[in-house]
Image (tube, rainbow, N blue to C red):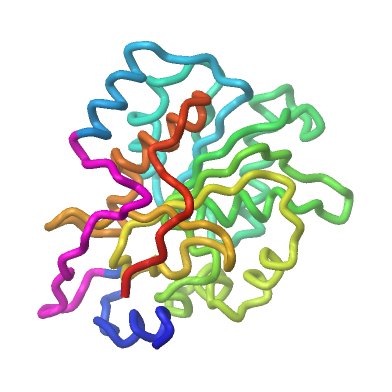
């Protein structure tokens, strides 16, 4: 049976923000053989890197999810920022209700940080949580005037690249409709040419976005099991296994992940 059908049938009832309804416990999951690192090992590795930070090759931009007053981006900063030296910018989209407005905010804040004009924004690396990943992808597509965010590497954590399980929930803003897998917005992202490296991470049993949607079709997906007692989606941004692998890649070290990426377990 198709993975997306299986997960749709398993624990289909969720409340608005993705908390499982009573009786829907997380199943036991084996470790990912292509991402063989424990939480303790990842924490120690982050400490090792923080003791000897490496200069960034280009500015680093850390993006929160929409509706998030920087909780996710703050956690990413705490994990990754100590491991590097250079310009790091953190941007949230707490007051935004659309992807169009979020793109404008991203470009506006970056322009201010780099001299006041969009043309002054240099090529950047981006780490983005959840819908922040879609904002980055959208900003990388040239607009009618040819303006775009020049990204070299985009690291996404639990981003709804192919839509989201809770898409269409009555949020009262355009974002919900735009994340339906068949939406025009998702189709636009699918069709756009990507001139940057995209590295996608997720945690299993994500009832909010769905791990099966966390990478564009055909792209590797690096997954880890969700620790017992944690909310999969809304703690993924603080998962030290994911943050350690991102930090290694940014520093030019060998990643903790080992290709080929293992398929998602059923």
Visible in this render: residue 142? yes
Closer to us: 147 or 11: 11
114 in the magenta segment? no
Say which residue appears at 40% left-offset and 79% top-offset. 3
**Left or right side of 253 for 120:** right
**Left or right side of 96 for 229:** left
26 in the magenta segment? yes
Visible in this render: residue 94? no
Instruction: Please identify the quadrant where the N terminus is shown.
Output: bottom left
What is the number of callouts on the image? 0
**Left or right side of 216 for 15:** left
**Left or right side of 53 for 122:** right
Q: Position of residue 92 (x, y in %)?
A: 48, 43
Say which residue appears at 76% left-offset and 57% top-offset. 193
Tell me the magenta residue range.
Answer: 19-40
Closer to us: 31 or 213: 31
């Amino acid at each position: 049976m198709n993975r997306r059908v299986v997960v749709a049938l398993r624990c289909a009832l969720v409340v608005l923000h993705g908390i499982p309804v009573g009786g829907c416990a997380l199943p036991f999951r084996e470790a990912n053989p292509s991402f063989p690192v424990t939480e303790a090992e990842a924490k120690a590795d982050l400490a090792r890197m923080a003791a000897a930070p490496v200069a960034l090759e280009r500015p680093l931009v850390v993006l929160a999810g929409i509706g998030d007053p920087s909780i996710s981006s703050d956690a990413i900063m705490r994990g990754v920022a100590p491991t590097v030296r250079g310009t790091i910018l953190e941007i949230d989209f707490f007051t935004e209700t659309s992807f169009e407005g979020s793109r404008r905010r991203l470009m506006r804040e970056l322009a201010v940080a780099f001299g006041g004009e969009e043309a002054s924004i240099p090529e950047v690396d981006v780490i983005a949580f959840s819908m922040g990943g879609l904002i980055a992808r959208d900003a990388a597509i040239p607009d009618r005037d040819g303006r775009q965010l020049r990204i070299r590497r985009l690291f996404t954590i639990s981003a709804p690249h192919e839509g989201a399980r809770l898409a269409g929930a009555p949020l009262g803003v355009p974002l919900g409709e735009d994340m339906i897998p068949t939406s025009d917005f998702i189709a636009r992202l699918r069709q756009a040419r990507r001139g940057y490296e995209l590295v996608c991470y997720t945690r299993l049993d994500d009832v909010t976005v769905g791990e099966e949607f966390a990478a564009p079709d055909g792209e590797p997906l690096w997954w880890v099991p969700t620790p017992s007692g944690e909310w999969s989606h809304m703690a993924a941004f603080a998962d030290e296994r994911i943050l350690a692998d991102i930090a290694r890649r940014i520093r030019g070290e060998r990643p903790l992940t080992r290709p080929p990426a293992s398929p998602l377990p059923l």
